[in-house]
Amino acid sequence: MIPSRFAERIRQIHQQLCIPEDYAQGTPLVLHEEPHELVPTELDFYGRDQHLTPAALTAWQGMKAKAQTDSVEIFLISGFRSVDYQCQLIRRKLDAGQTISQILRVNAAPGYSEHHTGRAIDVGTKGCPALEEGFEHTPAFQWLQNHAGEFGFILSYPRDNICGISYEPWHWCYHPQQQPSPDS
């Protein structure tokens, strides 16, 4: 259950950013409270510190190691993103002249991004520009499609997804209940 104080904070942020009041009712995206525990990961592609929940980090490290044994290189582009960071990201885009409806096709509203959970990762590979659809044509993406589920990761925004978010072949979220049992 999301604390009412958190929900009120999100409502105020949405109001400041001119996000429609009915955003929550009009999206299948879920309101995500930030996790209580985050741990540092390796530095991301840009040399920035990143964090994930302990379970997501363990799954990411296992997946990355398995990919490497299969001669596929994947690396972290981003992990945990706070509500405040998401707010700043949207403000920068508004200041650059984008409309809120344009932004919300690419970015979830603050409070609704899977990155807030500490379980979402953006993944890249050498030879492919970061955060571009061309990632779907890489051996890394093919490997993720075939193996990410073994580690509990799911592609969150496939083409024509019900969330209305643009296709993001690089965005994967850890869902521990999705891992196959050792007996399967």
Image: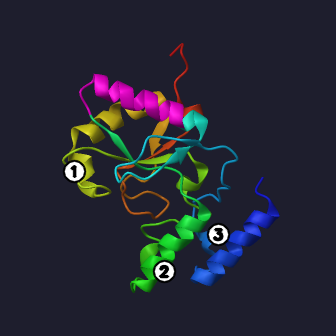
Q: Which residue is mark 2?
A: 100
Q: Quadrant of residue 71?
A: top left
Mark 1, mark 3: which one is toward the viewer?
A: 1
- The residue at 30%/34% (across/down) is 143
Give the residue at x 50% y 60%. 163
On the image, which quarter does residue 160 sit in?
A: bottom left
Range covered by the magenta-colored residues: 57-72
The residue closer to the viewer here, 111 or 58, is 58
Residue 1, disc: none
Q: What is the three-letter code of the residue carrying label 2?
A: Ile
Residue farthest along the left direction in this orientation? 127
- Side of 33 where 67 appears, left or right: left
The chosen color scheme is rainbow
Residue 116 percent location from the top left of the image: 58, 55
Q: Which residue is mark 1?
A: 128
Residue at 61%, 73% (x, y): give it: 23
Asked which secondary structure carries label 2, the reply is helix
Q: Earlier in the sequence, mark 2 or mark 1?
A: 2
3 or 2: mark nearer the eye: 2
- Residue tagged by mark 3? 25
CA separation, marks 3 and 2? 17 Å
